[in-house]
Image (cartoon, grey):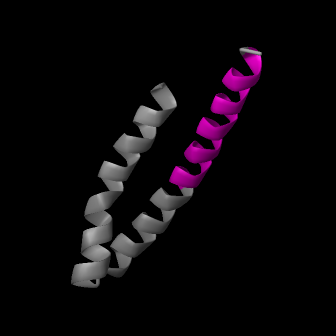
Amino acid sequence: MEKFNQVKTLISQIETDAYKFYDKGNSAAGTRLRKGMLALKVLASEVRKEVTARKHAKK
């Protein structure tokens, strides 16, 4: 559950950059947003691996 909470925290952190990029046209915010989305992808992959491991451990 810790990794899932990290996903939620990361999303809330990059939300501001998404607003600045899409609504204000701030290019630097777009760069930060892309970096945050990449970190989100990595974290999501870790969550998937964790879920799979727990599912197979219960069998």
Q: Quadrant of the C terminus?
A: top right
Q: Where is residue 41 in the image (x, y as percent from the top left)?
A: 58, 54
Look at the picture and state if 5 lies above or below 40.
above
Residue at 47% in and 35% down: 4
* Left or right relative to 5: residue 57: right
Residue at 34% in and 71% down: 29
Which span is picked out in magenta? 39-57
Quadrant for residue 53, please give it.
top right
Query: Does 54 lie within the magenta span?
Result: yes
Residue at 67% in and 22% down: 54
Look at the picture and state if 54 lies above or below 26.
above
Query: Does 35 lie within the magenta span?
Result: no
Near-viewer residue (35 or 9)? 9
Q: Residue furthest top?
A: 58
By secondary structure, the bulk of the magenta-drawn segment is best described as: helix
Q: Where is residue 28 in the image (x, y as percent from the top left)?
A: 36, 74
Near-viewer residue (53 or 30)? 53
